[in-house]
Image: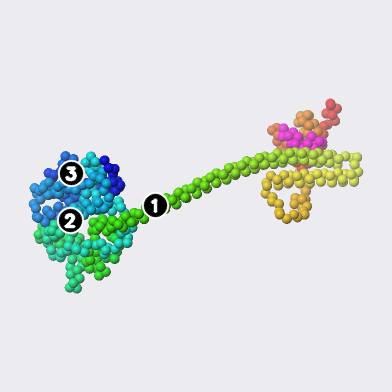
Amino acid sequence: MSSRSPLLQALSQSPALDRQPLRVTPQMRVTEVMDQLHQRQSSYALVIQENQLIGIFTERDVVRIAAQQMALDSLTIESVMTPDPITISTDQQDSIFSILYLLRQHNIRHLPVIDERGQMIGVITPQTIREVIHPTDLLRFKRVGEVMNTQVIQNSATASLLDITQQMVTHHKSCIVITETSNTTDIVPIGIVTERDIIQFQKLGVDFATTTAETVMSHPILPIYVNDSMMLANEMMKRHKVRRLVVVDEAKRLAGLITQTTILEALNPLEMYTTIEILRQQVDERTQELSQANEQLQQEIRLYKQLEKELQHAKDEAAAANQIKRAFLANLNHEFRTPLHAVLGFSQLLRRSECLSVEEKKNVGIIYSAGKHLLELLENLLELAKSQSTHLADDEVDFELSDMLPPVSESPVTITLTPKDLADLPRDWRKSLHRATIEGDFDVMLILIEQIRDRHESLANDLSTLTHEFKFDYLLALTQPPPDEDNDD
């Protein structure tokens, strides 16, 4: 068995395909079916017997019944339906052109679609085909005047509804345009009567012989101009949900008629094949461009990954360098700060000595000031190295490092401690602090002070302040063992 036609597959999946058509039995009365057609706004009903399609009943059949003035009371669908309707199967390899030819050949607007098991899938109509193929590119360049039907069946407003229906049957038309003559020769459309209108009038029991067209026609009409595009006509039909448009010229005179079938007939096979070929070439070009873009993207991804690896390597090296730097700074801090504290401590001790002359004490004071100044230089240097915020200039310039630092100032000590304030502290602790002060071991001094903070927080704060202010002479006086304690050693 052949595979399914791509077009039929598209049609079978189209949301415009009527998958639940009105189904009736052969024995149903025509009036009942007409009521259902009106309720569902449908133009046809499928006649089913034992799950098999045996006929179709359309608006055209209703017009024929009205034109023949048949009595509807006892009339059944079986007696007026079109038997053995033309169908199409999904396993056929039919193109769009063969389907359009089938519709034109049999002058039909409804084509039931069945599957390989004979089950009903839905019904194809001109609207369904338009929804699937979307012929906007072809319709955009075609004018209404090129494809409109100029042989328009028309009648006057005074014509009876019976005459109108008989005209439809005779000429096999789905509508009659109601016109009037102005300026002697100009024919102007003023209304229209369609098959759907006939169904409604039949349902209402209108007397077709005595009712005139002007009392039942649809007006004002929805016109389109000769020079408008077929795409505009297609969009107007969709927007207003109509199946035909009256064509007029610039003077509003009747020029022709456009229907859904006319739109499909405007699709010239050669033009469609040409358009399809152009679209295929465009798809191939876009595919090639996409392939090239994808390859370029892959290259950029590979480059990005390589750069990411290099960046990670640089980050690792920077982390290692930073670790070395921190170790260097910690060593620098320890190796310089400890001897400087010793210099400052011993300078203070020498300043208290009674053996030195005034000149010697002055020199010791200079040593103390220079040591303290050197310590501040060290702290500033460490701070600069840690912040990494200083950038060297390209040009070399002579400068004094001391000019970049704040001047050394002696902070006044406002602490008034006496040896009695430390009398309650352990003797060994006081001796350890005294010895660390003599040696200028700044770190040991701070460690000893922190040991008493839990019980003597205020005293620890004062001792820490004295230590940071390098008041070693003051600390030595506070921690000097009394004579009685010295004798115990």
- Sequence order check: which comes first, mark 1 or mark 2? 2
Residue type beneath disc 2: Glu
Which residue bears the numbered disc 1? 283
Tell me how far mark 1 sits from mark 2, CA to CA.
44 Å
**Residue 98, how many percent across, how many down?**
25, 51
User: Is disc 1 placed on a helix, strand or loop?
Assistant: helix
Stretch in magenta = 436-452
Q: Residue furthest bottom?
A: 183
Per the image, label 2 sits on a secondary structure element best described as helix
Q: Quadrant of the N terminus?
A: top left
Q: Is residue 304 magenta?
A: no
Answer whether residue 448 is magenta in the image.
yes
Q: Nearer the viewer, residue 343 or 77?
A: 77
**Viewer-nearest residue: 85 or 67:** 85
Identify which residue is drawn at 32% across, 55% down: 273
Badge nearest the viewer, 3 or 2: 3
Question: Looking at numbered disc 3 in the image, what kind of residue is underneath it?
Answer: Leu
Circle 3 residue = 53
Q: Nearer the viewer, mark 3 or mark 1?
A: 1
Position of residue 143 measured from the top left corner of the image (x, y, whole percent): 29, 63
- Disc 3 to disc 2, C-alpha distance: 24 Å
Q: Which residue is mark 2?
A: 195
Question: Which is more N-terminal, label 2 or label 3?
Answer: 3
